[in-house]
Image: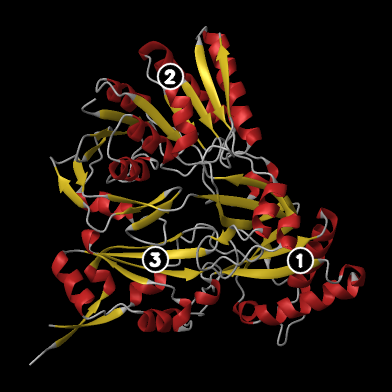
Amino acid sequence: MSELKVLTPTGMMGYGFPEEDLLKALDHNPDVMVVDSGSIDSGPQKLGSGSMTTPEDAYRAEFKILLKVVNDKKIPLYISSAGGAGSNQQVDSFRKMVEEICQQEGYQLSIACIYADISKEHVREMLAAGKVKPCGKSVPELTEDELDCTKNIVGQMGIEPFMRAIERDTHVIIAGRAYDPAPIAAIGIYKGFDPALCWHMGKILECGGLCAEPACQVMLGTLREDHFELEPLSEDSCCTEISVAAHTLYEKSHPYLLPGPGGTLDLSGCRFEQIDNRRVKVSGSQFVRTPYTVKLEGVKMTGYRTTTIAGVRDPNVIAALDEIETMARYFVLQNYPQYENRFKMRFQVYGRDGVLGALEPDLTPAKEVCVVIEVLGETQDIATHICAKARVALLHAPYAGRIATSGNCGFMLTPLEIPLGETYEFSIYHLMDVSDPCVHFPVKYFNVG
Amino acid sequence: MNTVEHANLMELASVIRSKNASPFEVTFDIIFKNKSIYEVVKKNQILNKEILAELYNVSPDHILDVIYFDAANAVKFNMPRSAPHASFGETDMHSAQQHVPLQGLVLELES
């Protein structure tokens, strides 16, 4: 095989893509379609509660388009980190959607599901053996207590579990949590291309057309012996040396060393070259093997959140907000002494330091500010009761020098308190040593139609 | 004799951004407009832990790394997040607005 063409319809399954760009990409005869579906960017609740990144109908609409291509053109479809968190439950939700569509449309397809849930007991044994380490300088050591509190754990699979499904010529692979570049790296390495180029192309294409200027969805990547090539399918977008190099740095803590399962991609010597006004050629990437580790992601439930949103225009109130917050805290505990130490409460002041928090260098407030009261309680009831009392205090607290006595803020919404349900926090973001890259990621095969 | 010029980072860079990198860190990217500007900044290590710590009013050991990347004319540095991603007290889930103080940074360029 002299080249391998990988089509990525979008950087995030469920976010949508222009169907005409996808159809245009098919004229290039791609060998495989690969879509990443996972991200921890918008928080730990997907792994905690099982909620998915987008509503099911958004996934279904994309599956309908993609499965038609799989069926009509015999181009396989690989999906990774199903549903957002890539838990077993989300893999099965995706499988059910695929099966339903295949049955409706009369497609006969083979499906491989690769699961990524990791048992707490196994992590406990590995932790005791000293084989679980923080992933990054800012991550604390994992403790037994923290592990006990953890609800769900997934591991990021590497290329090896994908290769097992690729070997069997599976039409559709639905994988649980995976290292984002893994499915593209797996097919490239399986077909015999340079692992460094395969990992690097995977790293760029897992985000779809985010490497183009302006960013778009549908992208085509072509792997060859000593380089790969990137082309956006949207006519309004271009890949440039700068847009691709910039994307190489995106959302990771080192610009040119990318550690992953089984090795580190070293991009210090890589070259980005403009081919024409829309395409860029990449070469010179290096891959250095390292002892095999799997990144674990785990979440714990921290309670229930309730919030209320208020606007403040009176400059006297704006100046007194810290004083009012102190009064609110006192008022809340006066009313609910039984809830002491069973909740946390804070005011977030947009228009002052609401976005930068402690890093805000300029604390001059705007002429009007938005106060969001955030309460985290042991139960939803506690959170809502505390939030309601804090809201009363915000509205009526007699701060020093008050002359407007009707109320300290304006509300836009009723009911005033908004219960937000369960809240989660990452408790595990650690690397675990493994001896067999496949052992934690079982593959199950299904035939539909 | 060397002359010192003052230049606003906004005028020297084509990208200044921040983003969450793992649930525990925020990463900052500055991509310079061209190789010659980048080389001056790199040669004199104008962007360093001390200047960045002062800008964000944190101690220098709070700035985890300052890494120069020639292939992209870029500098990257990292900071720990004040609390894990999306936990109580979150102000910027994607850490996408933490770059703003950099927009006001004035660099001394010696040429």
Count how many numbered circles sit on residues in the image. 3
* Along the line of sight, the residue nearer the viewer: A164 or A117: A164
> Residue A170 at what x, y percent from top left?
46, 20
Residue at which label 3 appears: B28
Could one spot residue A304 in this view of the protein? no
Q: How crowded is the residue under tag 3: few (<14 C-alpha within 10 Å), some, or many (20+)?
A: many
Host chain of mark 2: A
Name the residue beneath numbered marker 1. Answer: A391
The residue lying furthest to the right in this view is A338
**How far apart, in angstroms, are the residues tagged by discs 2 and 1?**
60 Å
Farthest residue in the left direction? B1
Subunit that carries the residue with mark 3: B
Q: Dot 2 corresponds to which residue?
A: A169
Q: Residue B5, located in which quarter of the rendered image? A: bottom left
The lab-note entry on whether marks 3 and 2 share a chain reads: no
Which corner quadrant holds the N terminus of chain B?
A: bottom left
Q: Residue shown at 47%/32% (left/top)?
A: A162
x, y percent for residue A362: 47, 79
Q: Residue at x 64, y 51 (%)?
A: A298
Measured from the top left, where is residue A336 in percent x and y? 90, 69
Looking at marks 2 and 1 on the same chain, the residue that comes earlier in the sequence is marked by 2
